[in-house]
Amino acid sequence: MSDLLYVLLTLASFAGLAMLAGVIDRYLTDPDPEPDEPAAATATATATAEVTR
Amino acid sequence: MTALSPSPAPSRDGDDHPRRAGTVGGTPVGFGRRQLLAALPDAFRKLSPVALLATPVMLVVEIGAVATTVLSIIDPSTLGWMVTVWLWLTVLFGTLAESVAEGRGKAQAASLRALQAETDARRLRPDGTEEHVPSTSLHQGDLVVVEAGERIPGDGDVVEGVASVDESAVTGESAPVIRESGGDRSAVTGGTEVLSDRIVVRITAEPGHSFVDRMIALVEGSERQRTPNEIALNVLLASLTAIFVAVVGSLYFVADYSDAHQSVLVLTALLVCLIPTTIGALLSAIGIAGMDRLVRRNVLAMSGRAVEAAGDVDVLLLDKTGTITYGNRRASEVVAVGGTVQRYLEEATVLASLADETPEGRSIVELLEGVQPEPLADAVLVEFSAATRMSGLDAAGRQVRKGAASAVEAWVRAEGGTVPDDLAPAVQRVSELGGTPLVVADRVGTDAPRVLGVVHLKDVVKEGIRERFEELRAMGIRTVMITGDNAVTARVIAAEAGVDDVLAEATPEDKLALIRSEQRGGRMVAMCGDGTNDAPALAQADVGVAMNTGTMAAKEAGNMVDLDSDPTKLIEVVEIGKQLLITRGALTTFSVANDVAKYFAILPAMFVGTFPQLDVLNIMRLSSPASAITSAVVFNALIIVGLIPLALRGVAYRPSSASSLLRRNLLIYGVGGLIAPFLGIKLLDLVISLIPGL
Amino acid sequence: MSETAAAFGQFAVLVVALVLVVPPLGRFLAHLYTSEKHLAVERGTYRLLRLDPDADQHWRVYALSVLGFSLVGILFLEAFGRLQQHLPLDIGMSALPADGAWNTAVSFVTNTNWQWYSGEAATGHLFQMAGLAVQNFVSAAVGMSVAAAFARSLARSRAGGRVGNFWADLVRTVVRVLLPGAVVGALLLVAAGVVQNFAAPRLVTTLDGGSQAITGGPVASQEVIKELGTNGGGFYNANSAHPFENPTALTNILEIFLILVLPFAMAWAFGHIVKDRRQGAAVVSVMALLLTTSIALMTWAEMAGHGTAPQLAGGAMEGKEVRFGEAASALFGAATTGTSTGAVNAMHDSFTAAGGGLAMFNMMLGEVAPGGVGSGLYGMLMLAVVTVFLSGLMVGRTPEYLGKKIGQREMVLVAAYVLATPVLVLVGIATAITANAGLAGLQESGSHGLSEALYAVTSAANNNGSAFGGLTSGTPFWNTLLGLLMLFGRFLPLILVLGLAGRFAAARTLPAGAGTLPTHRPLFVVLLTGVAIVLVGLTFVPVLALGPIAEALL
């Protein structure tokens, strides 16, 4: 009986750890949450437009 | 009290401008009682837990303060109320620091707002007739007419006409500037005043998105987004806080086990002393103050990220003209050709230049100061024109000309003269030395004109610029000179100025390509520029400083705008960026180092009752446990106030190598952070132990 | 020869041996972890297990491989322990209890080797050799593989989060390093007098006429991997204090050498892998600085023998073997707690309070001086990232380590790493001394009882495995608590390390310039040492104050 308990405890722990790896992976591969200056982005577009014009 | 580089090169003109007349000019660099009082209401508003979510460290302090308040109400004691009051003060000092930092921008914002007062705009209809509309209803692409005495209703480019414009309200520079259609001086800012003439402006900004709007948002800090490094530091601080929560939480149980029960009040006091409150409280103030320091130098950063990036810059692209050399060439020597007597040549050169008010002309007169030719009768000035490319004098019986070699040669030949054989080598030599040759010729009576000699106009490298480049090199920053000159000329100037590299005959595309290739190598690039041509490069660069005199396209592409339009400013921008980062690192180190002393104060105080032997750790010999705990808490709060000026000013920074910077800052803020609280807590204890009931 | 001279003498021998062996071994390891060639026996293994040793794994795949491999190891070992009485060579031992089997399985798979039981009284030969010893090899190899993956990630630029192949790392470490090392080491140990046989327990008549069963067995072969893989699980309960495991001063120094050689060599290999030997030398220096300091302090604490009992007895010899003496016991103690070995040649419970406190502090450092095989290196590198973050700011640049920017996401991983083990220890100690079942295991009360519990949870969460003694831990409560601490103390940091490795491998490597903070200079070495000490000090001083410090100041 308690054997089963420990096996389940082990499985649950490892499932948690595997999920953690997944969470970290998603966190690392998400597009940059750091706001990338919208001002600069539009400026680049404007500037490119100016040059191509 | 500026902490920046102590070697102000004389060339850094604009450095001493009164900052933004009427707005910043009077603000002292430190902070005074008035500023503190003015910031108080806002500081109280920021006590809201929602506002504190952004700084987990201070949120923990506030939760602690609430807890001790409740505990003190239930079970009042002198110690309880002392701790409670000082915990609240700790939070308040943190929000106060932020408010003070923001307050400095608020004053500027107020005066900028005055520029936005709605004015009457004269919009041109497609058929060319005018209509009067309020300035707030102007849209991109609208054409408006502005005449002398009127305010420009919105940001835009001059498409027709020339005018002198008073931009002092934005730049603080009182001398009017010329704005004209076409070219790189076409941008006008809404709210500035036209002093003369009439211009037609094409509006480039939608209402609410003008340059002044952005300035207001920036200086007020309302658009402030926390920068990547600030966020990363916050993560570290949050994890330290979490560790200490675990430490103090487990200590509750461990103390119980050891029969040394600790009240929640004392544990809260310990927790607040341990978590990095100093840096937590000052972190956002440091960021705001960094932006503000740029504003004081008349540089507007469009994002805090750009300021941080400035600290990381590896390569500086600098335009030759105006940054490395004085914008104008100066005469350095006069060489006679064709057997002309030197004295005669010099006199003729002075005659040809006396009326020449261009900087080049004046430099010739300055060079030949001792030469005083007899004035010619009935002299008439011949102005330089693009057609003749010569200037000079026509007098009775004598004509003197100076100008570009080919133009003067053509004139001499056309009038029947001959060109001496040694002219070409002389001209060639000047060119090879990186200079510009001017040829001087004259004609006496009706004789054929004669070529007299060559004036060597030379680019003059600004004084002190070489030393600044050496500093930059010490900081690990490579300088690249950008010039339209040919490679030979460019190399001569580059060697003289001591830049690391040179990009000669540079087109805007070359610049862009250079930036891209540096970035591919993982380096961060900073540059400044003003023309529309520069816009792609400005946008590509990690730090792009646009000159305020430049075009709107350039200003929008860059992530900073220099209102003084001084390209040398780039160096200061880099220094300010570094200073910002150093201030953060130094105060974090200080904050963590402080903890050591606090342990020595609080741990013996907590446990000496159960374990008398721990009194050995009370190396400060604090008078009583209650007084020791209170002293540590009070010190912890007061150190925040004490460091607000440092946070606002930034720590002292002088350019030097990474190792020596680290050694110096470690010594001051690491070792200092270890020692200071021992002294501070001891002194506070001497006072606090006098309080009855403790 | 005076005791002090002997203390210096054995230290000098150790230093010379390490200086001679570590650099070539480090170079060899670096080659091993970067080469693309397989040995024939390795290729056979891969084919047999249907593994692709050439796939460049994404960090998450690498991490899942580690987890899967370890999970299988735990379940297998747990079953083995429960069923050992049905298997050959059981020498009459019965099944381990459920909680004990689980604790032992977790303990050996996590390279902790905490032993709640007496080896000679609970485990048969087959379980020791085919169960525990196998994990002694592979759990060490797992740590080294992860460290190698981390080092490789720093050497890569824009590699899309790929950090190498776990199976290749694992198999190579076992085949090319641990097995040959164990063979050589075992021969040396046998030559020096360590027991190696398969005999059944032998009954002897003792001096006072009673009878005693002495279990022989494959001791030397277990002993060598116990040290080499910084495992620490002894054949006998007395561990390296037992005369069959560690008979002489010579075997003592040899065992200390075996404990230290791989952790240091891994740090040296790191320098080769990132193609800047100075970086490896800097890490080695920090480890050596911390270890030397702790050896010096511990030796001083033991030889000075403060405390009532030592002063009455004329020396702190309680719990120490006469054949080793105070200095050699302290040296072994520092080495075994500075690495994650946890083998002991004396009872740390009987160390002077200061000495016992130092042993705890060593473990609290997070096993970085020089730490477990592999885990010491990655632990130290994580601390280096924290140091770089603070000092990088102080030179006016956003921080970078070896050309990798330390931004928000990197910091989240590092912060979680720094947070994980201390929180486990603190939560563990709070639980242990609050629950009645926890208190029941403590032999003493007061400060010393606290030290016993603190030592146990610290040892478990940091995967050290050494025991303070005095704690009866073979109860369901302690077995479960310590098992969980060991499990999460091993795999939480490991996943965070691999995540950071993936992040680094995906990032571009920035060139170093004059403005970059140099991470190989003495200044940085001192700073990193300071950060390690201050960080740990600030975290654990309050608990230490109530345990060993309060006791030491008595």
Image (tube, coloured by chain):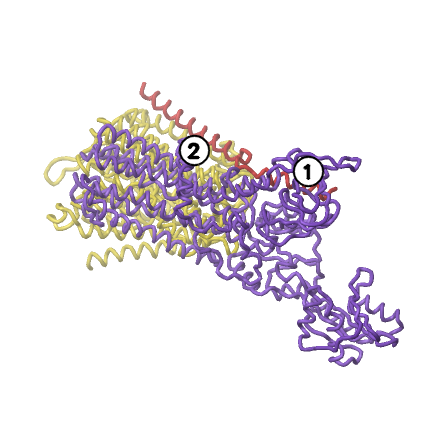
Q: Amino acid at mark 1?
A: Ala
Query: Is residue B392 visible to the viewer in this orientation of the structure?
Result: yes
Label ID, residue B121: 1
| In this picture, residue C347 sits left or right of residue A17 | left
Q: State whether residue C441 is above or below residue B563.
A: above
Q: Chain of mark 1?
A: B
According to the colouring, which chain is yellow? C
Q: Position of residue B181 (x, y in %)?
A: 73, 48
Q: How many neighbours does mark 2 have within 10 angstroms: few (below 14), some (14-19), or many (20 or more)?
A: few
Query: Where does residue B652 sit, x and y in percent of width and height?
Result: 44, 55
For the N terminus of chain B, the image quarter is bottom left
Tell me where residue C527 appears, x and y as whole percent: 38, 52
Mark pair 2, 1: CA separation: 41 Å
Please name whichever residue, C416 or C390, is drawn nearer the observer in this view of the structure. C390
Please give the letter of the chain rendered in purple. Answer: B
Task: Please give the residue where the numbered disc 2 appears in the rendered image.
Answer: B51
Chain represented in red: A
Identify the element where label 2 is drawn: helix
Judging depth in this view, the residue of A33 and B456 nearest the camera is B456
